[in-house]
Image: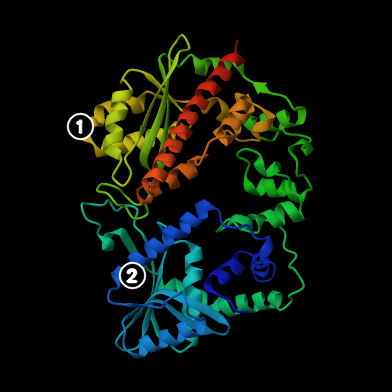
């Protein structure tokens, strides 16, 4: 079968996914930039975790065959090397590479599986269980199995304390309990993989995104079953079991739903709007929202990035670190002017950003954000970190109102929003010309690109860095201008 630990867990999630990976890999979606960033984070975390087990030897991945990796692992074990990184073994056509293998003086071993996650997930146990199975089958006495993951309650001091950054969780007993099922799983895999020409006829289901989003989804959903880009799976806040129940009944489009009285009010609005292809606008509710706003009105948007391994004092793993903001100030007479901030690359951006923010936004004005929970969370964490700015920052925090609210509550709904109230759907529905403006941007077109760009700025040459900094400013500026345009459409709807 030639399985690896990742192929094993893929097979547990969906046997068809495993078969496609082995025999029809061209139908799999390629990793995007965000996924590549996750892989890079995993590599960085893995390397750092090795320092918990010092003076070890790493089995090189490049320029060695798997046979050479296995032989070198065996050589290191015989030489008495205590810690081996990427220790490689093969048993019953199952190839594994143990992140960190600790070899005790009596010859017994300990498996350490490193994850960049902040918790132990069930799939990690299966990942480690196949490693236990291989080593046990080869005759090694496995004394312990650990899952090493990021401790998100850790707050960095002046120096990084690796032993506090990670949590080491003993999962040995759970791994042993999982051993009894592995032979039947492997036989199940083999029964499908032996039939190279017979693609498994596995229907779509919740397994398509649990525990991971599957890279076969476009093939299985769109190509094979012709599920449209917008379907009953896009009904807002509908239980996933109910979505699949509609699918099993042959209902793919919201327009096929004959009776919608059993759905929530927001879902009824969506379904009715789709069927009648009309806007549904609750003018009274929108007017109530607009009446809560006062001028001058400050439209605010942050850009943030995350670090699995915090580089600066006072930061926790995966904390949202703000590095940029845009503000469009809208006066009562419609006059608009713009303020912006972009932090210097390569250093902790938070304090300088916070100082500028309290300078740019008075304590008494109304601030508008889209999905205010995000902006409020950023400001609250800044206030906690900098006591000298706490009062002013919390005044800003308390004055924020949410432009998303009318759309989240379906007070304003267009069929083209497709059940979503994200700005990515609301903006082109209300202000189509803005969608073109985003497409015309250079280098940075969305928040994911902004996050990845800022993280790389320090390593760019000066010319390239200036180009990307300009692109970051233009992108963030467009975000708050988009909010101004959306608000104008709300006002128009009640005139």
Upstream in the sequence, badge 2 or badge 1? 2
Quarter the N terminus occupies: bottom right
The residue to which callout 1 is attached is 388
* Residue at the spot 75% in from the left edge and 68% down from the top edge: 199
Q: Identify which residue is drawn at 56% across, 34% down.
A: 438
The image quadrant of residue 45 is bottom left
Q: Residue 93 carries which label?
A: none
Q: Is 368 on the left-hand or right-hand side of 79?
A: right
Q: In this view, does 56 lie above or below 79?
A: above
x and y, in percent, of residue 138 in the image: 48, 88
Q: Which residue is drawn at 43% across and 34% down?
A: 473
> Label 1 near label 2: C-beta < 8 Å?
no
C-alpha span from label 2 to label 1: 39 Å
Image: 138 above or below 459: below
Question: 47 or 131, which is in the foreground?
Answer: 47
The local crowd at label 2, few if under 14, some if 14 to 19, many if 20 or more residues have their Cα within 10 Å, is many
The residue tagged 2 is: 50
For the C terminus, the quadrant is: top right
The colour scheme used here is rainbow
Give the total of numbered labels: 2
Residue in the image at 31% along x and 38% along y: 381
Q: Can residue 176 be seen in this view?
A: no
Residue 429 in picture, x, y percent from top left: 64, 28
Q: Nearer the viewer, residue 238 or 474?
A: 474
């Amino acid at each position: 079968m030639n399985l690896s630990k990742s192929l094993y867990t893929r097979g547990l999630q969906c046997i068809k996914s495993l078969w496609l990976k082995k025999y029809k890999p061209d139908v799999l979606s390629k990793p995007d930039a965000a996924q590549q960033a996750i892989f890079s984070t995993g590599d960085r975390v893995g390397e750092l975790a090795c320092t918990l087990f010092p003076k070890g030897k790493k089995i090189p991945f490049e320029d060695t065959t798997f046979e050479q990796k296995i032989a070198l692992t065996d050589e290191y074990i015989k030489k008495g090397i205590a810690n081996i990184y990427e220790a490689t073994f093969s048993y019953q056509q199952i190839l594994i590479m143990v992140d960190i293998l600790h070899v005790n003086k009596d010859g017994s071993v300990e498996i350490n599986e490193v994850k960049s996650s902040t918790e132990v997930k069930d799939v990690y146990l299966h990942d480690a269980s196949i490693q236990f199975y291989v080593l046990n089958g080869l005759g090694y006495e496995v004394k312990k199995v650990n899952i090493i993951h990021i401790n998100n309650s850790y707050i960095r001091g002046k120096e990084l304390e690796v032993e506090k950054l990670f949590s080491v969780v003993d999962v040995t007993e759970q791994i042993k309990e999982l051993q009894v099922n592995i032979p039947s799983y492997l036989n199940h895999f083999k029964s499908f993989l032996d039939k190279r020409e017979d693609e498994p006829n596995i229907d779509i289901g919740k397994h398509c995104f649990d525990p991971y989003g599957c890279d076969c989804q476009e093939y299985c959903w769109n190509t094979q079953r012709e599920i449209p880009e917008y379907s009953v799976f896009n009904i807002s806040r509908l239980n996933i079991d109910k979505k699949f129940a509609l699918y099993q009944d042959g209902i793919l489009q919201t327009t096929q739903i004959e009776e919608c009285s059993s759905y929530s009010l927001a879902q009824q609005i969506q379904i009715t709007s789709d069927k009648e292809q009309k806007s549904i606008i609750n003018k009274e509710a929108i007017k109530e929202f607009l009446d809560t706003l006062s001028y001058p009105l400050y439209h605010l948007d942050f850009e943030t990035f995350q670090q699995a391994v915090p580089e600066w004092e006072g930061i926790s793993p995966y904390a949202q670190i703000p590095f940029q903001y845009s503000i469009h100030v809208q006066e009562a007479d419609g006059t608009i002017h713009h303020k912006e901030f972009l932090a210097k690359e390569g250093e902790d951006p938070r304090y300088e950003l916070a100082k500028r923010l309290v300078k740019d936004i008075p304590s008494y004005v109304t601030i508008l954000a889209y999905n205010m929970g995000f902006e409020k969370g950023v400001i609250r964490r800044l206030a906690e970190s900098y006591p000298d700015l706490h009062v002013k920052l919390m005044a800003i925090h308390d004055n924020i109102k949410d432009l998303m609210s009318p759309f989240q509550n379906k007070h304003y709904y267009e069929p083209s929003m497709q059940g979503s109230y994200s700005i990515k759907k609301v903006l082109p529905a209300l202000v189509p010309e803005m969608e073109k403006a985003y497409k015309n941007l250079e280098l940075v077109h969305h928040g994911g690109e902004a996050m990845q760009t800022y993280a790389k700025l320090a390593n760019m040459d000066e010319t390239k860095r200036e180009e990307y900094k300009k692109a970051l400013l233009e992108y963030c500026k467009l975000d708050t201008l988009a909010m101004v345009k959306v608000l104008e459409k709300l006002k128009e709807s009640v005139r």
